Image (cartoon, rainbow, N blue to C red):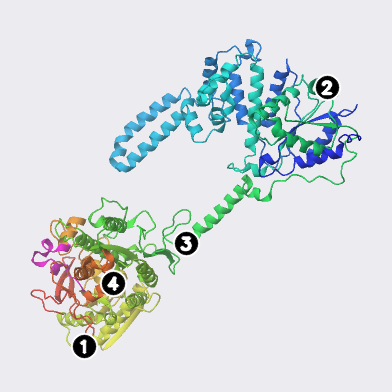
């Protein structure tokens, strides 16, 4: 026989300690952690080796503690105090951990049960077994149970809460009536449900019997769920111990704490709770991923373990729990024993051998030692005899510190804060960018690409594009109304108080109803000017009037049962589109419309674009070239009627200039005019084609002998330019032809008066745009100077439209009265909201497009594709070429497109009336001089111009 291996030296122990505290394996059972007991192999004390391991633990940045529990009356009481010390987070507060200090919620729960069962501090000895009855223990625990770890007891309302609650109930009762009258029922029901939910939540959080089973069942409150479900407590004496639930378990534990052996039982459940808490702290797939962040096990050093300090009892309890549960816990316990304690507790020394070999032999025999037929005492103890100088054989160099993987810093409070800050910065940047680009932006990064923000030359911003999904063009809370004032949108608005926002809301509601009904439909885009620079919102009023007319035509087409409604089979949707001030962004709007038409084949045409500018003309050319028909409202261009797929309801500029000859005849001016001033906008962004075109037509048709053209750029400079021309006019001007816009008319009148042109008889002729203005001295009215006779053209002269009781038989007037409250009980010849005729003209344009679509649907039917796809822009175009609608359904006369694209393509049957405006008793008095209705329908007693 050879000599036995030498006893374990510092090198072997250090190597084993280094290996066991290395990075934890993926599978916990790959490295069981024993209870290492350092015992003397000779006369030396093993404590220097313990101190060396502490230095190694500090060098390797391990989380370790060396508790010193006070001696108790017996070993179990001392062990209980030691277990309590180990399960206190403050014990681990000074450890060098790269993650948060460990928490012990299960141990905290056991301590609350212990406190509930123990007597008051003044009642004598607090060591188990306790004399308090189990029922009293359970009631006392319930009285102090808290939902959160920091909570010392249940949620309780203060004494003054009932007074505050009664006062709140009284205030709510007083306000409830008024709130209910002004709040929609859906909002009231939602608010009541939220309030009831809050009250139920507060009530539930204040009652342990409510929140405990609920939270435990959904996985919140792990310590309560563990106590109710762990099989460790199933062996408490009842056959159905697994089915007792939390309350049953609590009562059985309280009973055991009153029986003999309660101290040993309490030590075991505290040890079990401690080990389960440690295992839970290393759970890899916890929300915090804490198992990945703790690279090494917790280490506990128990110096001079003995009976008096509870060390031996705690080691025995840990071994018993691990043997009973057969579970592995990432907790490395290193204890030191003196020779006397070793001999008394373990029965003498153990043969020395290599520490790593001793561990491998222990691990291989662990399964057999835990078998039910074996009776191995303390199977989880690994006895390591030590002797000699601890640092004598320590390897050169430092041990590698245990560091958490770098990637885990990404999932940490620091990483989350950094990610949150980065996300907030990126989100803020994205929101700023999106809100500067799009009109409707959701959270976090949703947007509606059919409308976009555009910048005017003055730096103001406008929402331009096609309104889909209820996007508003205006940014503020107020909205421009039909009467020209800014008002708050409301479903109760009527007449002149109806705002653009009201119209957009109602149109969107009607569109959604059409889609929800699953009936065949087509979609029309109405393009107008709905926004302008600050202080110039009056420029949008005419487009709001036109949109109102389109909405009336939509209701007439989609509904039946009310006067004026026909309820066509093919329903109509309307998408409002904004081209910006002076239609400067008509090209952008055309791009949005075409992009939308590619996605939505139900779009069959565009109505509107009634302002003749270079950008609007380019947009019309782009739309028609793409195959979308454009039905224009009041665009009087001489050139656009020559475009294929373009249809207009307005007379041309040349026809308006020709009507000026009738004005000269009516004024008694024979032959050519000697002195004439022609006031027109000069070229400039956006170029106003209307003004320059009609000015050329006037010179060509009227042929004044000495025409003097006064150019201006806008409302800001027209007054000074006209005043200067009047000052230099020698002899004075006989005729002034205003080829500008309605918004420039006040400046024109001021310049004429200030320059002295109105000191003599003056003949003022203007185009159709002046029909948007109202003459007088009231709000939004233009004063007519003395000695001035005004002639202007109008496409739809209201007194002619309502003649022969048409206001009580025509669909348009019936719809306007019933839906908007306009023109009740009868339409007056000077009805403010209808006198410009633009609402009626757009009603007819929308009616024409929807009727062409209906004709195509009647011809094709639903046999191609059920729904809107059987009617496309191509089929509508074919119907428009042959469309003729007689007066009655239409408002402004007949609608006749049959000759629009003949040779030459110049329609001559559009409505046009020359109106003379004079002062009578200080009030403007309009009189029709000549004219006709739409479609060439003659006016009784009036010859065409």
Image position of 875 (left or right of 413): left
Quarter of the figure with the N terminus: top right
Q: Distance between the residues labelled 1 and 2?
A: 139 Å
Write down the region rendered in magenta: 794-812
Image position of 353 (left or right of 422): right
Q: Where is residue 462 in the image (x, y as percent from the top left)?
A: 40, 64
Q: Position of residue 693 (x, y in %)?
A: 30, 81
The answer to which of 621 and 398 lies nearer the viewer is 398
Q: How crowded is mark 2: few (under 14 residues within 10 Å), some or many (20 or more)?
A: few
**In this rendering, does residue 522 appear at all?**
no
Q: Residues within 10 Å of mark 1 (few under 14, many from 20)?
A: few
Q: Distance between the residues labelled 4 and 2?
A: 103 Å
The reply to whether discs 1 and 2 touch (Cβ–Cβ < 8 Å) is no
Q: How far apart are marks 4 and 1 (CA)?
A: 49 Å
Quarter of the figure with the C terminus: bottom left
Q: Is the magenta stretch mostly helix, strand or loop?
A: helix
Q: In this view, does 431 lie above or below 772?
A: above
Q: Nearer the viewer, mark 3 or mark 1?
A: 3
Q: What residue would you read off at disc 1?
A: 672
Q: What residue would you read off at disc 2?
A: 343
Q: Which of marks 4 and 2 is nearer the N terminus?
A: 2
**In this rendering, does residue 243 appear at all?**
yes
Tell whether position 806 is magenta.
Answer: yes
Which labelled disc corresponds to residue 436? 3
């Amino acid at each position: 026989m050879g000599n036995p291996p030498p006893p374990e030296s510092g090198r072997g122990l250090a190597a084993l300690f280094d290996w066991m505290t290395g990075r934890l394996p993926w599978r916990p059972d790959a490295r069981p952690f024993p209870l290492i007991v350092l015992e003397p192999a000779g006369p030396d004390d093993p404590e220097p080796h313990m101190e060396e391991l502490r230095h190694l633990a500090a060098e390797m940045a391990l989380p370790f503690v060396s508790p010193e529990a006070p001696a108790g009356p017996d070993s179990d009481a001392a062990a209980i105090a030691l277990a309590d010390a180990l399960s206190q987070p403050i014990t681990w507060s000074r450890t060098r951990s790269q993650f948060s200090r460990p928490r012990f919620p299960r141990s905290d729960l056991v301590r609350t049960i212990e406190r509930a069962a123990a007597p008051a501090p003044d009642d004598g000895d607090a060591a188990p077994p306790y004399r308090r009855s189990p029922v009293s223990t359970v009631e006392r625990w319930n009285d102090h149970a808290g939902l959160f770890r920091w909570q010392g007891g249940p949620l309780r309302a203060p004494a003054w809460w009932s007074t505050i609650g009664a006062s709140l109930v009284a205030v709510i009762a007083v306000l409830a009536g008024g709130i209910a009258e002004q709040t929609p029922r859906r909002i009231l029901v939602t608010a009541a449900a939220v309030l009831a939910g809050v009250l139920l939540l507060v009530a539930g959080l204040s009652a342990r019997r409510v929140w405990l089973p609920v939270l435990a069942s959904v996985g919140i409150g792990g310590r309560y769920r563990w106590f109710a479900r762990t099989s460790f407590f199933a062996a408490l004496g009842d056959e159905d111990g697994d089915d007792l639930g939390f309350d049953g378990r609590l009562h059985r534990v309280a009973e055991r704490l009153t029986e003999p052996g309660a101290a040993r039982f309490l030590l075991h459940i505290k040890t079990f709770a401690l080990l389960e808490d440690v295992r839970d702290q290393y759970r890899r797939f916890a929300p915090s991923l804490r198992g990945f962040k703790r690279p090494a096990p917790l280490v506990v050093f128990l110096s001079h373990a003995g009976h008096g300090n509870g060390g031996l009892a705690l080691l025995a309890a840990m071994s018993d729990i691990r043997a009973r549960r057969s579970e592995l816990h990432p907790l490395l316990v290193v204890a030191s024993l003196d020779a006397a304690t070793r001999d008394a507790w373990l029965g003498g020394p153990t043969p020395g051998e290599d520490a790593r070999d001793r561990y491998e032999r222990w691990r291989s025999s662990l399964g057999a030692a835990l078998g039910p037929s074996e009776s191995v005492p303390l199977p989880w103890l690994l006895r390591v005899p030590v002797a000699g100088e601890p640092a004598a054989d320590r390897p050169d160099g430092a041990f590698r510190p245990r560091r958490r993987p770098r990637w885990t810093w990404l999932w940490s409070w620091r990483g989350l804060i950094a990610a949150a800050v980065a996300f907030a910065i990126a989100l803020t940047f994205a929101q700023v960018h999106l809100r500067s680009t799009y009109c409707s932006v959701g959270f976090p990064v949703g947007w509606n690409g059919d409308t976009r923000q555009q910048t005017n030359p003055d730096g103001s911003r406008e929402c331009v594009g096609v309104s889909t999904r209820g996007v508003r063009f205006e940014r503020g809370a107020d909205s421009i109304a039909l009467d020209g004032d800014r008002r708050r949108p409301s479903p109760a608005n009527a007449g002149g108080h109806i705002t653009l926002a009201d119209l957009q809301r109602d149109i969107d509601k009607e569109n959604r109803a059409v889609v929800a009904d699953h009936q065949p439909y087509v979609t029309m885009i109405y393009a107008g000017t709905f926004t302008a620079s600050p202080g110039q919102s009056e420029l949008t009023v005419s487009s709001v009037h036109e949109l109102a007319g389109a909405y009336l035509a939509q209701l007439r087409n989609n509904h039946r049962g009310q006067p004026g409604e026909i309820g066509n089979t093919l329903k109509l949707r309307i998408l409002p589109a904004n081209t910006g001030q002076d239609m400067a962004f008509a090209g952008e709007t055309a791009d949005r419309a075409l992009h939308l038409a590619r996605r939505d084949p139900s779009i069959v045409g565009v109505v509107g674009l009634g302002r003749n500018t270079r950008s609007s003309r380019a947009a019309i050319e782009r739309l028609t070239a793409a195959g979308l028909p454009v039905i224009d409202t009041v665009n009087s261009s001489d050139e656009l009627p020559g475009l294929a797929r373009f249809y207009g309801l307005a007379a041309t500029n040349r026809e308006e200039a020709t009507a000026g000859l009738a004005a000269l005849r009516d004024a008694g001016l024979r032959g050519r005019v000697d002195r004439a001033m022609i006031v027109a906008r000069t070229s400039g962004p956006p170029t106003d084609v209307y003004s320059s075109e009609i000015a050329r037509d006037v010179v060509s048709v009227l042929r004044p002998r000495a025409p003097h053209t006064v150019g201006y750029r806008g409302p800001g400079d027209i007054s000074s330019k006209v005043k200067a021309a009047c000052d230099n006019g020698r002899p004075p001007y006989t005729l002034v032809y205003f080829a500008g816009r309605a918004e420039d008319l006040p400046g024109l009148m001021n310049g004429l008066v200030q320059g002295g042109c109105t000191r003599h008889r003056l003949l003022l002729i203007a185009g159709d745009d002046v029909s948007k203005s109202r003459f007088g001295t009231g709000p939004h009215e233009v004063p007519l100077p003395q000695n001035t006779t005004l002639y202007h053209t109008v496409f739809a002269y209201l007194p002619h439209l309502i003649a022969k009781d048409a206001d009580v038989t025509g669909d348009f007037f019936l719809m306007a009265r019933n839906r908007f409250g306009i023109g009740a009980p009868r339409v007056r010849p000077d009805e403010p909201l209808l006198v410009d005729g633009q609402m009626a003209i757009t009603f007819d344009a929308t009616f024409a497009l929807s009727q062409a679509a209906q004709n195509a649907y009647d011809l094709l039917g639903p046999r191609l594709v059920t729904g809107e796809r059987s009617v496309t822009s191509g089929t509508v175009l074919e119907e428009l070429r042959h469309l003729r609608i007689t007066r009655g359904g239409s408002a402004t006369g007949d609608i006749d497109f049959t000759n629009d694209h003949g040779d030459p393509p110049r329609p001559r049957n559009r409505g046009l009336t020359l109106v003379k405006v004079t002062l009578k008793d200080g009030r403007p008095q309009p009189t029709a001089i000549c004219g006709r209705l739409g479609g060439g329908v003659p006016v009784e007693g009036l010859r065409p111009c």
